[in-house]
């Protein structure tokens, strides 16, 4: 029989205690960025948020307050000074940032249906600029504030490396974003800044619903993923928590799939039962 002994080890504090992070991409309480923010705040992180414009501020400010944050800044990443101006304002309030979450993407809805072949030059440039270049620009401007190293995390999708219905130019933007993750990981590794992406399965968000036949993709993924379902905001949030925290101290340049395993499948089994609606 094992005798009960007094455990003298100190109880560990919250995982993110003392860590400060910036969250880009909350539009509402269905946003992936919000799912991430809730997990990070729940584990003791101090957060600052951005919102795209005044229309989004109405939702983002109360959400930020609900996790104890009064730091909310406007930031339209398509504007010349959008990111630089926002990081400057943040630097007036915080002398250090430990992690940054980039959950921002945009393409003209009219080109998230039909053929990729028909993508216009304007929408190609606009989509790549907002959905991909903004991450590189953000990394460059945040670096001086990441004085103790830290973690940059962005969001991507399987459409970056395999063709999914109607994802079109967004797939090309995500492929470029994933390549950026690898280049940035090398450029910033010497500063102990890690750079990773989460490839999330399909989720019912504002951006997700802009893609034509999103419901088909959602249902097909649930029916054919090894876990026989789609993923939740909390599950994506927990992976972001791992990547933002010191638990992933040895991980950089990675694309981590949080998609109930769907990416490993090729041909669905003919006898596969359907996942519940
Ligand atoms: P969402 O609509 O909640 O978030 C998208 C965010 O992008 C919004 O907050 C919006 O304000 C912001 N944004 C767009 N243009 C901007 C601009 N010019 N300046 C600043 N912000 C701008 O949708 P979401 O699904 O949570 O998307 C977050 C990220 O997750 C995106 O990168 C998306 O591609 C990615 N993602 C989504 C899914 C999905 O199925 N929903 C799956 C994998 C990856």
Image (cartoon, rainbow, N blue to C red):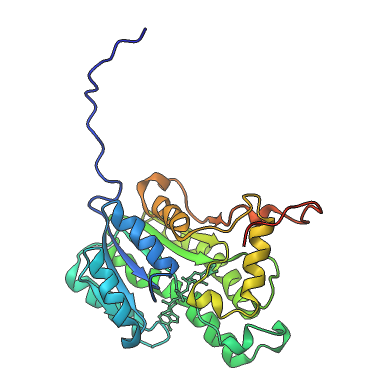
Image point 65% across, 77% down: which residue? 213
Residue 117: image location, x then y, percent:
73, 85
Q: Quadrant of the C terminus?
A: bottom right
Taking 232 as reference, is 140 left or right?
left
Looking at the image, the residue that sits furthest to the right is: 270
Where is residue 153, by image quadrant? bottom left
Q: How many marks?
A: 0
Looking at the image, the residue that sits furthest to the left is: 93
Residue 135: image location, x then y, percent:
44, 72
Please name whichever residue, 33 or 153, is drawn nearer the observer in this view of the structure: 33
Taking 76 as reference, is 113 left or right?
right
Looking at the image, the residue that sits furthest to the top is: 1
Image point 28% across, 14% down: which residue? 4
Taking 146 as reference, is 271 left or right?
right
Q: Against 174, is 272 above or below? A: above
Residue 52: image location, x then y, percent:
37, 82
Where is residue 149, by image quadrant? bottom left
Image point 21% across, 23% down: which residue? 8
Taking 131 as reference, is 114 left or right?
right
Residue 197: image location, x then y, percent:
50, 61
Where is residue 191, by image quadrant? bottom left
Q: Quadrant of the N terminus?
A: top left
């Amino acid at each position: 029989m094992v005798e009960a002994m007094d455990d003298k080890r100190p109880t560990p504090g919250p995982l993110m205690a003392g860590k400060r992070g910036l969250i880009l991409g909350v539009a509402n309480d269905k946003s992936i960025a919000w799912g991430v923010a809730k997990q990070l705040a729940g584990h003791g992180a101090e957060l600052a948020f951005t919102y795209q414009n005044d229309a989004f501020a109405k939702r983002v400010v109360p959400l930020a307050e609900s996790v104890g944050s009064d730091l909310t800044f406007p930031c339209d990443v398509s504007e010349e000074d959008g990111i630089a101006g926002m990081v400057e304002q943040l630097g007036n309030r915080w002398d250090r940032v430990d992690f940054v979450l980039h959950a921002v993407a945009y393409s003209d809805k009219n080109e998230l249906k039909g053929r990729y072949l028909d993508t216009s030059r304007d929408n190609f440039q606009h989509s790549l600029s907002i959905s991909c270049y903004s991450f590189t620009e953000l990394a460059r401007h945040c670096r001086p504030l990441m004085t103790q190293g830290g973690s940059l995390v962005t969001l991507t999708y399987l459409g970056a490396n395999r063709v999914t219905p109607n994802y079109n130019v967004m797939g090309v933007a995500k492929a470029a974003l994933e390549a950026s993750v690898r280049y940035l990981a090398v450029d910033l590794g010497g500063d102990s800044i890690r750079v990773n992406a989460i490839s999330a399965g399909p989720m019912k968000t504002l951006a997700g619903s802009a893609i034509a036949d999103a419901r088909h993709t959602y249902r097909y993924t649930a029916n054919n993923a090894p876990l026989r379902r789609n993923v939740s905001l909390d599950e994506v949030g927990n992976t972001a928590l791992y990547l933002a925290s010191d638990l992933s101290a040895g991980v950089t340049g990675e694309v981590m799939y949080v998609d109930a395993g769907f990416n490993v499948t090729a041909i669905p089994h003919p006898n596969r039962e359907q996942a519940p609606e």
